[in-house]
Every structure is written in structure tokens, then in C-alpha cells.
Image (spheres, rainbow, N blue to C red):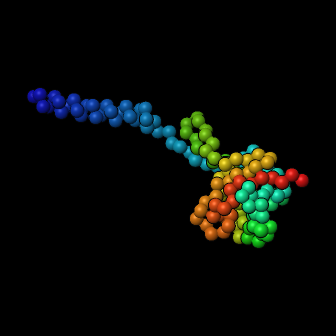
Amino acid sequence: MKKSIVLMLIILVVILSGFIAKLFFLRGDKILKYSTLNKNQIILAGEWYSTKDSASGISVRDDKLAFFKNFVFNDSDIYKYSIIDSIYEEGNHKNIKGQYLMMVGISNDTIYKKIISRNNNVLTLEIDLENQSYIRKGLIKSFRKIKE
């Protein structure tokens, strides 16, 4: 008799624990992940030189940018850019997880670089180490705007 009561109590605790967990922790709110255009789409036009290599950097004109090394850039280094926000939304809460530089090349390849900081004087990008070109090897991360 005591064993059956103990067994029933254990089953009841397990059922109640699952119910409480569902109520408080697993409310059913799903995290919605999406991106949207940032309100400020502007990177100031002009030259942005690497803080580590003054012969490398980014040249910005209108909505296009080009990466250069040794003051030279190729057609494949020219991109049309947009700045996007990565947003996670859960219930009524929106959280901007990051800001990204989205670049579309002449062959329609799209590359994303996380923007660590951005203002009128400094642009800092997180560069991945997987790709092979100089801009993607992690050699260039921070850029300073040259005053004209």
C-alpha cells in the first residue's frame, strides 16, 4: 500500500513539474529572427584607411565600396552595400543582436561583415578567417576616415 502511494506521488510530482515548466519556461513564445535595413545607411564617402596598414582600406562612393590593398583594387573588390540590423523578437520584446554590412558583388555574391563600431571617424568590422582574399583573412579590421 505504501509503495503504491509513493509511486502515485512520484507520478503526480512529475506531471506537475512538466505542467509548471510548460507554464513558466516554455510559454510557447518562439524567437523570431529577421533582419531589416538600418535607419542610417550612410558610411561617409571617401577613403577609410586600415589602422594597421595605411596602404589598405576601403573607398566609399554613394552606395558602393571597394576594398584596396597597396592602393590598388580589382573589380571583384567592388560591392554595393547596405547596413542591416539583425533582430530577435520574442513576444513583445525586440532585441537588436547586431549590425551588419551586407555587400553584393558584381557576380551577385553576398558577403556579410559584422559592424563592431561605426561613426564618422572609425569603422570596425569583424572579419572571418575562412575566406582567402586579404580582406577576409582578418588582416583588416578597423578603418579610419581620412579628413579631406
- The quadrant of the picture occupied by the N terminus is top left
Residue found at x 81% / y 52%? 145
Foreground pick, 57 / 20: 57
> Which quarter of the picture shows residue 87?
top right
Q: Where is residue 43 shown, x and y percent of the image?
A: 79, 52
Residue found at x 68% / y 54%? 125
Foreground pick, 35 / 69: 69
Residue found at x 72% / y 58%? 52
Q: Where is residue 61 shown, x and y percent of the image?
A: 83, 59
Foreground pick, 35 / 111: 111
In the image, is 85 to the left or to the right of 66?
left
Residue found at x 78% / y 64%? 55
Q: Is residue 70 above or below residue 82?
A: below
Foreground pick, 137 / 106: 137
Q: Where is residue 130 shown, x and y percent of the image?
A: 58, 65
Residue 146 seen in the figure: yes
> Which quarter of the picture shows residue 2?
top left
> Which quarter of the picture shows residue 80?
bottom right
Residue furthest to the left in view is: 1
Number of on-image labels: 0
